[in-house]
Image: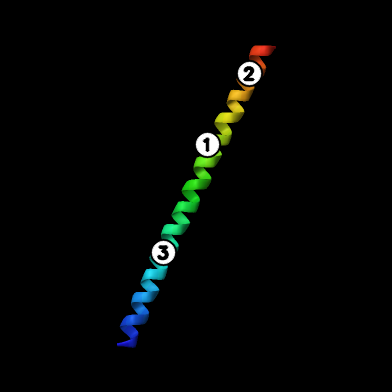
Amino acid sequence: MPTILSNTVLGYALITGAVLLAVVIYTIIKLRKQVRKAKEKEERKKNRKE
């Protein structure tokens, strides 16, 4: 019985960790895209002024 319980807890921990990692990676990708868009917008503004 203790083996089943420890396997369940281990499985839950692995799944939770994987989901957390996926969320962190997704957030980093989204933020990078947002920064890239902001830089492009800034470049366009500079080009218009010149």
43 displayed left or right of 23: right
Q: Secondary structure at mark 1?
A: helix
Q: Residues within 10 Å of mark 2 (few under 14, many from 20)?
A: few
Q: List the single residue furthest toward the bottom.
A: 1
What secondary structure is found at the residue carrying circle 2?
helix
Residue shown at the point (59%, 26%) measured from the top left: 40
Spatial CA distance of label 2 from label 1 is 19 Å
CA gap, disc 3 and disc 1:
26 Å
The residue indicated by pointer 2 is 45
Numbered circle sitting on residue 33: 1
User: What residue is drawn where x is 58% and y is 30%?
Assistant: 38
Q: Is residue 50 above or below residue 15?
A: above
Residues at badges 2 and 3 in contact (C-beta under 8 Å)? no
For marks 3 and 1, the one nearer the N-term is: 3
Q: On the image, numbered disc 3 is attached to which residue? A: 16
Residue positioned 34% across, 76% down in the render:
8
Q: Position of residue 30 (x, y in %)?
A: 50, 41
The amino acid sitting under disc 1 is Lys
Image coordinates for residue 1, horizontal then vertical, percent:
29, 87
